[in-house]
Amino acid sequence: MDEKLEMDRRLFEAALAGNISALNQLIAENPLILADSALISPHENPLNIAIKAGQLGFAREVIGLRPELAREVNKDGFRPLDIASAFGHIEIVKEILKSCGKDICGLKGRDGRTAIHYAAINGKIEVMDELVSSRAECIKDVTALGETVLHLTVRYYKFESFRKLMELLEICGLEELVNWGDEDGNTILHLAVSRKQHEYVKLLLSNGGAAKKLEINAENKRGLKAMDIMDKLIVDNPSDIHIRETLQRAGAAPAISPIPSDSKLHHVAVNVAKIKEPETSPTEAEKEDWIKYFRFQQLRDSPSDTRNVLLVVAALIATVTFQAGVNPPNGFTSPSTQNVPMLAPAVTVGLGTLFANLGSLQSASQFFLFGNSLGLASSICVIIYLTSGFPFQRELHISIYSMLFAYGWSIQDIDSENRTRQHIIMGSAFLLPFLLRWLPRWAKRIWRWFKKKDKLSV
């Protein structure tokens, strides 16, 4: 056994160095050395070692002596052709195809992948060409997850491989592959949009070559189109906006939920039919009124973006009002109406001027205390509502209530002559934002309860 182990070690050293003379010497000593190697080291054969080292001559000799080694899977799930394709050893790929037949291209290994999958995700375009030339059908191979080679180039960000595959699809007459979905029904357009890959989206929507067959409004198994996925993403840079505009120019539209067939709900179908797709590009009227264009539009702006903006604004207001309470202005000098910021709409300007003038009254400290506390409480309400369900919710609430406690302690010198009045003002300011939201809701519930009770009594 020790002698066989020593010969096996010498065989692998020869494969690594590409030493054909050493291989011939070992075969002269033991004609069955390649077979014995499979028993002694079943996890890796010398052909794989030679291919990894790029030793074409040695690989050719081994394939000639024992061609079945080219079809064996090693312990990691790779075949020799997979390894050669991943490393881009084009001459070894040609040798394996010539010696073992074209059908070897379609043999699946780890995760159901074939040689063209490994060539594509490693950017070996020349190998892809050779594999498709030998067996065009290999481009249709799918993995265990239902992914085509196109899906893999999108997932692994291999744009040049993707571009080459789009050309090969047209040459082979397999343009329909651009609409193939994976096990979740996601096409390459779904995948490219979800990963914000602008180059891929642009190429797919170029309306040339295989892209002409693209079904832009195809739905995945969750009923989502590419535009639905785009609407769920956080738009945080100009490239994301460009993707959305590119999709819209190409005719992409979000999916509309199925309409119930019940005749009683016919009016729902009528209302949905009247809904028009929102436009993100400015119309002629909006070009003249940019305020109207940049105003929030429910059908256009995503909820996640709106929530992020509200959180930023609420945090900013909380910071400013807290700081103003800790360090109140000396003498509570009231600003003139000329210093009131010109905010839209006009009602806001009027209210701002009114409150500024009220500050000139004798009870300026009371107005300051109420207004500043109300602003802090309202912003904290927004933060609490928008962060509902966030992780670390308990710690967040502790920090908020601690800040309120510190705020209340820091403003004790404001209107210190009348503590009772100060407590009433503070309590009113902190309760008002909650009451304005919850009182109408409870009033509606009580009203509905009374109406229901009256109907039952009749």
Image (cartoon, rainbow, N blue to C red):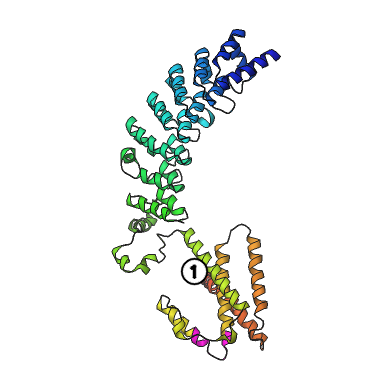
Amino acid identity at mark 1: Lys
Residue ID for mark 1: 455
Of 93 and 53, nearer the camera is 53
The reply to whether residue 262 is in sight is no
Residue at horizontal 49%, vertical 21%?
Answer: 56
- Above-or-below relation of 438 to 50: below
Q: Is residue 112 above or below residue 308?
A: above
Choose top left, top right, bottom left or bottom right for residue 174: top left
Percent of width and height locating residue 71? 51, 20
Residue 277 visible in the snapshot: yes
Q: Is residue 253 above or below residue 384?
A: above
Left or right placement of residue 420 versus residue 279 in this view: right
Is residue 362 rendered magenta in the image?
A: yes
Residue 10: image x %, image y %?
63, 17
The part of the chain drawn in magenta is 355-366
10 lies left or right of 143: right
